[in-house]
Amino acid sequence: MRGPIRFCAAVARGLLLALACVSASAQVCSPTGGNQISLVFINGVDNTSLDYAFSKLRLTEEYGMTYLDTSGRQHEVRYPTFYNPTHGKLIDLYETVFMIKQQYPEWDVDPVALYAAGLPASLYPDWVFPDLKKYNEYMAAALATAIASEVAQVNAAMRDKMLLQLAADASVVVVSHSQGNLFSQALYAAVHDALAERDRDALYKMLHVAPPAAIDQSRNTYITNTGDLVINAIRVAGSRAPEGNVTVPLLLDPAFSGGVDHLRHGFTDLYMVRGLTPYSGSSSHEGIRDALEHYMEAVSGANDDCVAVDSRSTWLEYHDLPPDFPSSLGPVMFDLAAHGIQPGDVLELSSQGSWLYSAYWGNPGTAVGAAGVFQAGGQYVAASVLQPSDPGSAAPAAPMVTACSNVIVSDNPADFLIPDTAWSRVRVPAAATHLLLGVPDCFHGDNEGVIQVAVRKVTAAQRSSN
């Protein structure tokens, strides 16, 4: 039998904070060294294993075997093989229109010009397509042939291989080209449940190159050449492929400059060519190089600060505890300015690890999570209200309400919860100089254990990549 009842250490308003043992599935941050990054390439259809090797080699040229992040940590980069062996041809769509052109010689529009425009067939006047229904039937059949070959078998093999990467605590950046984007999206769905909410956002990124179908643009970046004849053909056929967002200048276009990629679709022959817009970007849109760099930096955790927090740490005050009850510790003081953080900045916070409570009473339990509160001029201040335009994608931090039984404890209306296995987001209030860190509990003095809290400043670049 223990003394005062330790009831509900902390609750989000209306939501009980569960004090259950939850194991973190991946590392929040690595203060002593860099984590491993797996840079995965998934090719499109009709690529030989040699074609795949050349494409993967091109990515290897970007980073080699190590990546140095902006905080000076070095990360091992691995390039696991995720070869897509399917042989349905997306270029069949392009070839199909020539076949239809022969059957319907009255068509007056050059198929190349048609695909270069990339508009849906429904937008063209009737005289362009005397039999629009027949055209759509041809194109739909070609599209189905192009993407349906061996998909289930390839998905299963890729899923198992990706789970091995995640089991090794690797951060993952997936670069997929053409039909490979269908596999990358199916792959993410297959491993989704193996990723904690925090890790889906911070440790797994996807860069889509020339996607032939709709993608989740809220969390993923894509690069498509406006003159990509294969993707334009698919769009004409009715696919919801995203619109082109980078344009190769006419004088540099492989179709006109003696290059080999007359379809303007190849990964190594167009999209990864240094000096061309899909790779280098433009004044209005980033290219593959910058998008990939943002993702590598994001999964490296370079913007994370790891803070060790003793579970005895708190800013709360107690009264009427037993005379021999162990003393609590003051909160961990995180100096904002020393870490390049200013009022108005948006932070994302996450915790890792567990701690024991009720050791004093002889029946310890296990809890997870952390808590924080801002300080300005020696006073506690609440976080500023997040605005719709603020960067970051994590949920706003939930307020912490301390409710204890059989003991008097002062609640702090300005403090908030920092979740385990997820990120929460706060806006630094005006004049704040420190972020105080502790754990959500009532009687901190008898706690045992140290957890890690990750603090990262969110930038506009990170917002586009989350």
Image (cartoon, grey):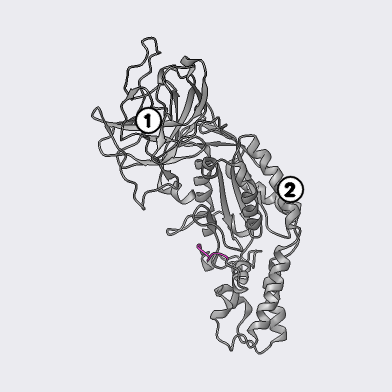
Q: CA distance from mark 1 to mark 2?
A: 50 Å
Q: Quadrant location of residue 331?
A: top left
Q: Is residue 416 left or right of residue 194?
A: left
Q: Secondary structure at mark 1?
A: loop
Residue displayed at 74% across by 64% down = 88
Residue 273 makes an appearance in the image: no
The residue to which callout 2 is attached is 157
Residue 25 % position (x, y):
58, 35
Crowd tier of the residue under label 1, counting other residues whose Cα lies within 10 Å: few below 14, some 14–19, many 20 or above:
some
At label 2, the amino acid type is Ala
Query: Does the residue at mark 1 contact the one at mark 2 (Cβ under 8 Å)?
Result: no
- Residue toward you, 287 or 339: 339
At label 1, the amino acid type is Ala
Residue displayed at 65% across by 49% down = 190
Residue displayed at 40% across by 41% down = 14
Q: Which residues are magenta?
A: 241-246
Query: Of label 1 and label 2, which has the lower sequence position?
Result: 2
Residue 164 % position (x, y):
68, 39
Residue displayed at 52% across by 30% down = 30
The disc at residue 144 is none
Classified by dominant secondary structure, the portion drawn in magenta counts as loop
Crowd tier of the residue under label 2, counting other residues whose Cα lies within 10 Å: few below 14, some 14–19, many 20 or above:
few
Of discs 1 and 2, which sits in the foreground? 1
Q: Is residue 138 left or right of residue 343?
A: right
The residue to which callout 1 is attached is 403
Does the magenta segment cover residue 243? yes
